[in-house]
Image (tube, rainbow, N blue to C red):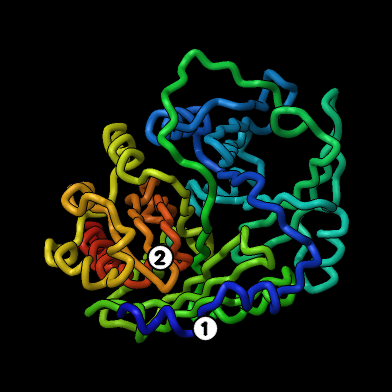
Amino acid sequence: MSGDIRNVEYGLNKIFEGAQDFLPLMGTDYVEFYVGNAKQSAHFYKTAFGFQSLAYAGLETGVRDRASYVLAQNKIRIVLTTPLVSDSPIAEHIKKHGDGVKVIALWVEDARKSFEETVKRGAKPFMEPTVEKDEFGEVVRSGIYTYGETVHVFVERKKYDGLFLPGYRKWESVYNPPASGLKFIDHMVGNVGWGEMNTWVKWYEDVMGFVNFLSFDDKQIHTEYSALMSKVMSNGNGRIKFPINEPAEGKKKSQIEEYLDFYEGSGCQHIAVATDNIIETVKHLRANGVEFLSAPPHAYYEEVPTRLGEHMKIFHEDLAELEKLAILIDADEEGYLLQIFTKPVEDRPTLFFEIIQRMGAKGFGAGNFKALFESIEREQMKRGTL
Ligand code: FE2
């Protein structure tokens, strides 16, 4: 379950050859969650994850049907939106899925062209190109559906120097907890239904010009009880990475099936955020009450030097500290990475976060899949969903 996988279909350089970068994507612009109570969710993301208040739209700014709180930490922007009326697509979304990710917004040079090109290639429209203006300039946005009810919104902001988007005002708060060292979104993972992974892989290839640069089948990702399959999609410049998971047959119900049951469909499974000091970040998050999956057995940490091989030369971490904090370690040809996963951040066992520190490695922690899934299965056992 370790080194062999990474040699298969691996090679970031190939991305640049295979991808058709007609969009192109400059980065993640923001992630918007539809939630039952945005005011309280915003408090949670500030308190627990150290996000900072940035902007607000709602009744006070003339918006009658929703309230949105924008939070930021370094390059990460999240928007928490709640409906103010029951007769609303936002309310319908929450009724079906619970709190979750609705919009994965992508920063583009030209939102009109991004819409035209992707729709021409088969995307289902979500939002026609729309120009929004205020005293700070104008933003053009457009959007298409991806898996489930999740959407990609293309954001063109080259003529805008406001805080976030037209219609939002600065959110001044007297409550400003310290940041936790989260820097940017490293990748966002989608869970799709039985037999749908390759459909969505092809969708990202055909519609978005992405390439599949890593694949894991159920023989590689399995525990005694459950299995899943995963393919990692990347855009041409490598800034946007979307692994796509589907469940596979196992003795018991996999975490992907559990997600699909509770989200009632395909959706975003986890958001991986990068830090450059995972030990400090995780200490900080734990002190704030963020709950993480439990540590693998001690033997896992004893095997680290063997698993890392020659990368031990550049490995200066305190293994005992990593074990105490339940941080996982993996390596590939180019270096190593440190990662840890939170428990789901809603009552439905759906969306969770990953904290990741890359020390050269470009993979996704394949060597940790088994330990990780066994840890998730311990949680599923408690929920009666294994
Ligand atoms: Fe991940």
Where is residue 268 shown, x and y percent of the image?
A: 52, 58
Question: Eyeballing the image, is 205 above or below 54?
Answer: below
Q: What residue sits 85% from the left and 50% below the top? A: 129
Which quarter shows the C terminus? bottom left
Q: Name the residue under label 2.
A: 335
- Sequence-earlier tag: 2 or 1: 1
Q: What residue sits 37% from the left and 43% below the top? A: 277
Q: Residues within 10 Å of mark 2 (few under 14, many from 20)?
A: some
Dividing the picture into quadrants, the one containing residue 227 is bottom left
Question: Eyeballing the image, is 257 above or below 171?
Answer: below
Q: What residue sits 20% from the left and 54% below the top? A: 319
Name the amino acid, label 1.
Glu
Residue 84 circle label: none
Where is residue 191 shown, x and y percent of the image?
A: 49, 67
**Residue 202 showing in the rendered view:** yes
Q: Name the residue under label 1.
A: 9
Which quarter shows the N terminus? bottom left
Q: Which corner quadrant of the figure contains ligand 1?
A: bottom left
